[in-house]
Image: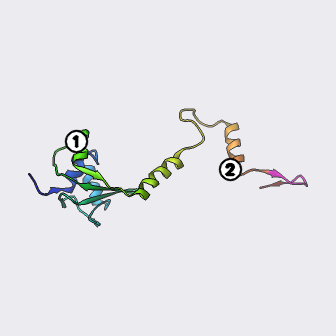
Amino acid sequence: MKTEVRIDKWLWAVRLFKTRTLASDACKKGKVIVQNVQVKPSKNVKVGDVVSIKKNPILFSFKVLALSENRMNAKLVPDFMLNVTTPDQLELIELAKLAGQSGRDRGTGRPTKKDRREIEDFIEPTFIDEEGDWSF
């Protein structure tokens, strides 16, 4: 059994990245952190290390429980890593989901002219003052 594995191989093996090239590119761009240090793809990880991955605006953290160089079945992944992402980071995910929701249902097409006017009035209502002038 190996005591160390390249970080790009491990990230690919535990299905955090779809291809090893994507894992390697993330390391090169400084998005992968091991023990609070940005790492290159050739950095070796060992059992007990904490690997963090920056995916804006969230920093996901995983503890290495076991090592593997071979891609595994998704059901086996929990045996190899433990998600230790902090609750405040998980809260950012929920906020991002809420911010992405708009008032329109998916698949309803583009807004009509009437819809657009209603949206504009909601965002910036127009009023007529006592003198009959438009005020914004």
Give me the residue at 49% from left, 47% from top: 97
Q: CA distance from mark 1 to mark 2?
A: 49 Å
Residue receiving disc 1: 76
Give x and y (percent) for residue 21.
24, 50
Q: Is residue 95 left or right of residue 31?
A: right
Determine whether 115 is above or below 31 in the image.
Answer: above
Residue receiving disc 2: 123
Q: Coloured how? A: rainbow
In the rendered structure, which disc, 1 or 2, sits on the residue that comes first in sequence? Answer: 1
User: In the figure, residue 26 lies in which quadrant?
Assistant: bottom left
- Split into 4 quadrants, where in the image is the C terminus? bottom right
Tell which residue pokes out farthest to the left in this image: 1
* Disc assigned to residue 1: none
Residue range (magenta)? 127-133
Q: Are marks 1 and 2 in contact (CB under 8 Å)?
A: no
Give x and y (percent) for residue 112.
66, 35
Check residue 50 for magenta coloring.
no
Q: Is residue 131 left or right of residue 124?
A: right
Main secondary structure found in the magenta portion: loop
Give me the residue at 25% from left, 39% from top: 75
User: In the figure, residue 111 lies in which quadrant?
Assistant: top right
Q: Which three-letter amino acid code belongs to the residue tagged 1?
A: Leu
Give me the residue at 81% from left, 51% from top: 127
